Amino acid sequence: MRAWRGMALSLLAMCLIVDARAQGTISNLPRKETLIVENPEGTIKNAGWFNIWAINAGGQSTGLHQLGMDTFWYIDPQKGIDGVWDNSLASDKPIYNADFTEMTVKLRKGIFWSDGVEFTADDVVYTIQTHMKTNGLRWSAPVQINVAEVTAPDANTVVFKLKKPNSRFHALFTVRWNAMWMMPKHIFEKAGDPLKFAFDPPVTLGAYTLNAYDPNGKWFIWQKRPDWQRTSVARFGEPGPKYVAYIDPGPPDKRVIAQLNHELDVIHDISPEGMFTIAKQAKSSHGWFKGFPYAHPDPTLPAVVFNHQLELFKNRDVRWALALLIDIKAVSMASYRGAATISAIGVPPTGSAPEVYHAPLEGWLAAFTIDTGKQKIKPYDPTIGSQIADMLRPSMKDQIPSAADEIAKSFGRGWWKPNPQAAAELLERAGFSKRGDKWFAPDGKPFAIKLMVEGEGRPVMTRAGSMIAQQWRQFGIDAATVVAQGNMVDRRQAGDYEAMITWSVETWGGHPDLSFFLDSWHSQFVAAPGKPQPPRNWQRWSSAELDKIIEQIRQTAFDDPKGLELGRDYVKLAVREMPTIPLMSYNVFTVMDDTYWTGYPNADGAPYTDPVPNWANTKYMMVKLKPRQ
Amino acid sequence: MSGYPAYLLTRLGQFALVVFIGINIAFIVTHATPIDPVEQSIAAATQFGSTSPEAIGLMRQSLKELYGLEGGLGDQYLAFWRRIAVGDFGPSLSAFPTPVATLIGRALPWTAGLLVVSTVLTWLLGNLLGGLAGYYRRNRALRFAGVLAMAFHPIPYYVVAFVLLIVFGYLWPVLPLGGGYQMNMPRTLSWAFIGSVLLHSILPVLSLALVGLGGWFMGMRSLVSNIVTEDYVVYAELAGVRRRRILGSYVMRNALVPQVTGLAMSLGAIFNGAIITEQVFGYPGIGTLLVSAVYAGDYSLVLGITTVSIVAVSLAVLVIDLAYPLLDARVRVH
Amino acid sequence: MGRTLIDLLRFNRQFATGLALLVVVTAFASLSFFSPYAPNDSYVVPPDLPPDWSYPMGTTSRGQDLLWLLSFAIRNTLLFGIAVATLSRLLALLIGLVAGYCGGLIDRALMSLNDSFIVIPLFPILVLFYFVMRDRMSWGLLALMMACLGWAYDARLIRSVAMSLRTREFTETGIFSGMSMRQILVEEHLPYVLPIVFSTTMNNINWSIGLEVTLSVLGFTDINTPTIGVLIYWANQHTALVSGIWWWIFFPVLLVVMTFIGLFLLAVSMNEYIDPRSRLGRTGP
């Protein structure tokens, strides 16, 4: 008995001691000067590797490309601090010759590496020539395919001579999440084989250097350079945080707890339910939108992607029928609990796209007609966005906006009205038949679809897929979801799927040019069945009409307004052919805690960049953050 | 104990055979995975940025050459065994060219430390509780403790871990939410560092112990209740030997023998890592390494980890088998 | 047989409690046959409602009535666990008893086989199996795989008991009386081994459920069939614990614990019953 009492007393004593010491001890850095950010890469397998040019399991978004790297230009997914386009290492936009076979870049003066050496055109030439000589680097292939020769007429000018005309060669150096970064010549020329050099500690061009890192890959801490004025981001001011820590915060539940404890300032992504919990419990936590739907719409478009090399999906009527069976309101509720920004067209409803594509095409969409063979219907319902808002208003009350343009921004505009009757007619015209309450394909076999979803890594899309499969099932199609846990990438690339929930459309965001994804949809790149398909035409769709549009875009300059017209032609073609069924933008629940820092970007007053922390564009956030305490 | 040296030799032969078979199975299994490390690397590299389709083909070729995946399966098999003979697992394919041994070496001490401590602790507590409960049948406190241990045992570990995290990390925030030690603390052998490591290991060890206790408890209890009815125990009780002495010297000693077997095997099995523990508590270790290696189709790393695991478990089993005849006098060596 | 069961029920409180728990769980599992909702459908009822009279166990974030969903889940999990346990017990008994009795070369060979199965790390094999099977994965196949991987440890245990039984007098007596190996194993050794088999069965059921939950939490699962693991998978996807939807985790865990404690009490009381000397010991004052 005495033993029990002794144990109980020592346990109690231990608890008291631990309690006294436990407050606010996440690290020994001064909390008021530290910004703690989530790195969605998780635990970095090879933590001591900072050579971002070699493909290695070292981290990229550990702060390395957000705070340490730099290149010529940045395009902001939102509005940008001073416009969407920023000349970072370059002092001006790219200068092409008349037939796009030569590009000249003028570099900024006064930029220094973190070890005191000045950045010049020699670094650029060295970077490009290294990639030309060495196979297997991250950007070796695009450089070797495009660049015939690179020269530096003076210390601040670089001239690229291209192997063939490429009006968008500058995209290689334009940051949209990342881009080709510049190597320090004075370090790499002494380092031997660039594929084997770890670059630890990294010599940076950005405003921060590496302070410390965890050899087990759980955290990376960056420190503001004392000579931050000699970096490109200094044009906008001094970066606020002295230390920035990128950590692996664990499963989604744990991220919520960490922010509620004020131990995590920026969450990259959590589930909608986690978002609602934080919004309820922590007044200091904010999303991109002040109220519902909170999330930041990434310039990415999740859709139902069909495998066009399967007989089943070659007929447009089948694809349209499946689209008319989807009730997007239910899908939005199932996946995002209503916090989704829907889009009926093949462009994500974010950045500049709503003004350039969604709004101008409303009229055309409302008038768009389908002939099912038995009737003519106008499938577009422009009120679905506001219907979702109305559905949520009773429970969410004044968190739901009421103004029409705000609803359009947060929830999206319209979508296709569910119409099982029209879907049945379209299927019948395609040779399908209904016996009892099950549908059969033209070859007599039951109409079955396996809808592939990514599983644990993308829970919201998994939920959307489950709901869509359920809606198809209720119609009489034998639809089921299959989870491609861990091998989604392989299967998508190999075309080893029937239909899946993923995205094949990604745009710049701030800039309306569509070439970022559209160029790869040309039929010249469609792989034979069984061979791996290069990104991003996962659906393996070939269309002569689309090829014409793409070839015309290739001939127009990046900022030419004619490109927008061509973009709208693509949108109309995609609506008619329905190669994929666009659903909504990829909403990321990035949550920012303003207990220690203010000045985060948000939709209402400060859309100056994308707050999603693994984007290299977030370097612009650092200059706007100011300490709260 | 005649014949023991012969037994020793045959047993060592069996050990070598088992390790050999195990590693071969691991080789076949990892190379049978449909995940291609080259495609995974390409996907990782091209996931976000802009890419041109022509570039992908070029990338694929260069990576294949780089990773040395061009020979057929037979060549890779021979190359693998040649390397293993000198203890070199080769470079990791997803973290090329970092050697697999380096990656494992960074993570293994954490797993070993955590799991050795929690396994031994759980074993001690579980057996103690089980022995007492099996012997003092009528004791209410012991029965209640037993039911408690049994109640925790089947709860899915994930749930126990998370509830503990919520209770001690959020509701009464006295313990850190995750990590192996405090962020940014220098890893020197100082009191501060050791203290931090201990503090961060409390929740993982506690969760593992709560769930694992029931297993040892159950086993010990049934063993003890079997032994209690043996002749020599009854005789000792009738002869008036103190109950505590009987429990300690007669009953537990004999009951512990199979439990020691179990302990050795559990210690061998720690090289599988505790994946959920590492996920929930953000604890460094080889579980996370293994999962990410499997996802990346990184043959070398998966093979490296499984080889370490196979050798460790085989060694544990070997030690048990060699020690068992020495512990239990009734077992004669054939 | 019936009389002994009734006796056990009347006099052994542990047996009665264990049986009662199991009956409750089985009855709950059989409720699944009367469910008004298909197990895979979502958003059939308002989501996130706490337990009250109309929804005794509350509703999930996917708009499913937890009571009916759980009845399916526990039924599937129990069937899965029993299948794995039965198959692996058969394997373990066969190999363990034969190895322990025969000794010599047969013992060596069987133990080499056994050890090879012990040393192979489970996780990569199961994940690989999942990748290879992909869309053709089914619970039956997974049960078969897990049974093939889960017999080795217990076979060793049974073998060590068999080894010590081999040297006992009654075994020698049996051999001298001319009993065949099969007769000795089944009639003499099996009753001693059965108590261990019962407790290892429970362990095995626990292990298979635990492994199934682990795989589900990591995402390697067929999400179209509800089991306890799939239930926890969905709860995890919706961050139920942090969102305050505690009932989604609580009730499945409660049922699993009830099942396990029921089996445990049953095993313990039957253990005492089967071992003749402890039964005599209990009928005393």
Image (spheres, coloured by chain):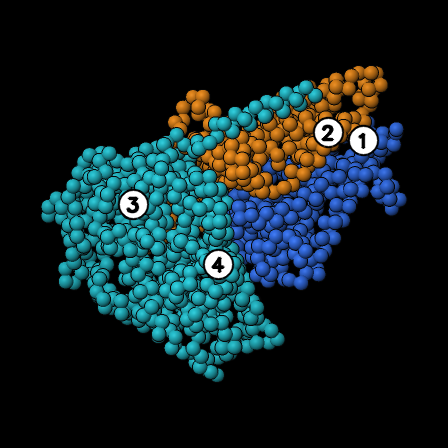
Mark 4 to mark 1: distance in Å?
Answer: 79 Å
User: Which chain can be seen in blue?
Assistant: C
Q: Which mark is residue A397?
A: 4
Residue at 15% x, 50% y: name it.
A106
Pointer 3 residue:
A624
**Residue at point 13% right, 48% down?**
A157
Question: How busy is the neighbourhood of tag 2: few (under 14 within 10 Å), some, or many (20 plus)?
Answer: few
Q: Do labels 1 and 3 share a chain?
A: no
Identify the element where label 2 is drawn: helix
Let me know if marks 3 and 4 both belong to one chain.
Answer: yes
Q: Looking at this view, name the residue that lies furthest to the left.
A: A153
User: In the image, is residue A147 above or below residue A467?
Assistant: above
Mark 4, Cα crowd under 10 Å, few <14 / some 14-19 / many 20+, is: few
Kind of residue at disc 2:
Ala
Q: Residue A129: image x %, image y %?
A: 20, 46
Q: Quadrant of residue C270?
A: top right
Q: Position of residue A554 (x, y in %)?
A: 24, 64
Amino acid under disc 4: Lys
- Point out the tag, 3 or 4, that comes first from the N-terminus: 4
Q: At x 23% / y 46%, what residue is drawn?
A: A236
In the rendered structure, which amino acid carries the disc numbered 3? Lys
User: Which of pointers 3 and 2 indicates the residue nearer the eye?
Assistant: 3
**Residues at marks 3 and 2, CA–CA distance in whole angstroms:** 61 Å
On residue C171, the disc is 1
Are the residues flagged by discs 3 and 2 in contact, CB closer than 8 Å? no
Q: Circles 4 and 1: CB distance less than 8 Å?
A: no
Mark 1 chain: C
Chain B colour in the picture:
orange
